[in-house]
Image (cartoon, rainbow, N blue to C red):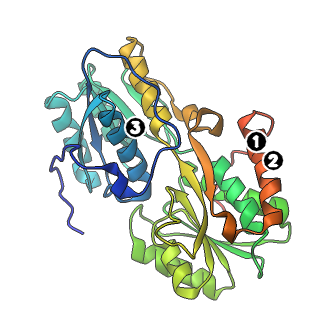
Amino acid sequence: MKKPGLDRRTILKSGAALGAASLLPAPMVMAQAPIKVAGVHASPVENAWNSRLHVAMLEAAERGEIEYVFSEGIAGTDYARAMREFAEQGAQVIVGEAYAVEREARQVAGDYPETRFVMGSSGKPQGDNFGTFGTWNHEAAYLCGMLAGKMSQSGVFGAVGAIPIPEVNMLINGFRQGVDAVRPDAKHLINFIGTFFDPPKAREAGLAQIDSGADILFGERIGTADAAKERGIKAVGSLTDYSERYPETVFSNAIWNFGPILGAALADRAAGKSSGEDYTRFGLMKEGGNDISFVASMVPEDAIAPMEEVRAAIKAGEFEVDINFDEPA
């Protein structure tokens, strides 16, 4: 795939092509004029994580809340430069990911105090203009694990992740906890591919896990479901909905919705409040930030009711999925 580097593309295309509808719209932000928002995507916007940011911003633009431009496929060595270029061009809010460039991204924010930055990060907010968020769809992953635990014949479950950063660890651990809740004797195989976007490498990792006995794969990375499809087993998707892309393979997805996080950050700006906040909490299920999607016809009927009971309890604040940032072994 061609990576356009620092090319700018406007929003005159539908986000539907990404196959990821938001769970809930971002809160309406009342403003006299659309806020100028720039997205700086380290991976192509087809990448699951980036697609969730991209779709939320496309939808906000369609509602007239923002004007949205973006760059994608930005290498770490160019990332700070892309941020600076958008700030120089008048972007009022810059959305992106600081995971691999924490120091550089914060330096840019310090140089542009009038620009607000809302960045995926494992660190804390900084000053009044550098807000952070984590990817907390671990609750949905837990529910997917509950279904998977009832479907496996071998009792061996594979999971393919990007890099063992806290958010990725928490997600895989959430899935494992859900499996273990209904399948205490489960065996788990974990592999990290060392990058956020390499579908062929994720596929190879998935195939290796299948060769080791796994009959259900949890795909934190794009490409994992390709291995499951190739070998005729089932898979769980993450972040976005893969069911249509893999209709006989993916039976459930741990959906993450960036809309509530974006909405909260825009609302703070509109109210004149600091955006040096941790917006992660808006990704919780009770905020509409994550949820499970599943294909009922592919799941044993007796697995659905217990899962739905826990799902309702999570939304009501009566059940909490443990947050475990430790690297899964």
Instruction: Residue 127: tell me if it is visible.
Output: no
Q: CA distance from mark 1 to mark 3?
A: 30 Å
Q: CA distance from mark 2 to mark 1?
A: 5 Å
Q: Point out residue 180 in the picture as x, y percentages from the top left corner.
A: 80, 62
Residue for badge 2: 309
Q: Residue flagged by tag 1: what amino acid is it? A: Ala
Tell me which label, 2 or 3, sits earlier in the chain. Answer: 3
Residue nearest the observer in this picture, 28 or 102: 28
Helix, strand, or loop for circle 3? strand
Please identify, in this view, whether the residue under mark 2 or under mark 3 is nearer the observer. 2
State whether residue 46 is above or below residue 258: below
Residue for badge 1: 312
Residue nearest the observer in this picture, 91 or 305: 305
Q: Point out residue 145 in the picture as x, y percentages from the top left corner.
A: 71, 61
Q: Point out residue 132 in the picture as x, y percentages from the top left corner.
A: 45, 33
Tag 2 and tag 1, C-beta contact below 8 Å: yes
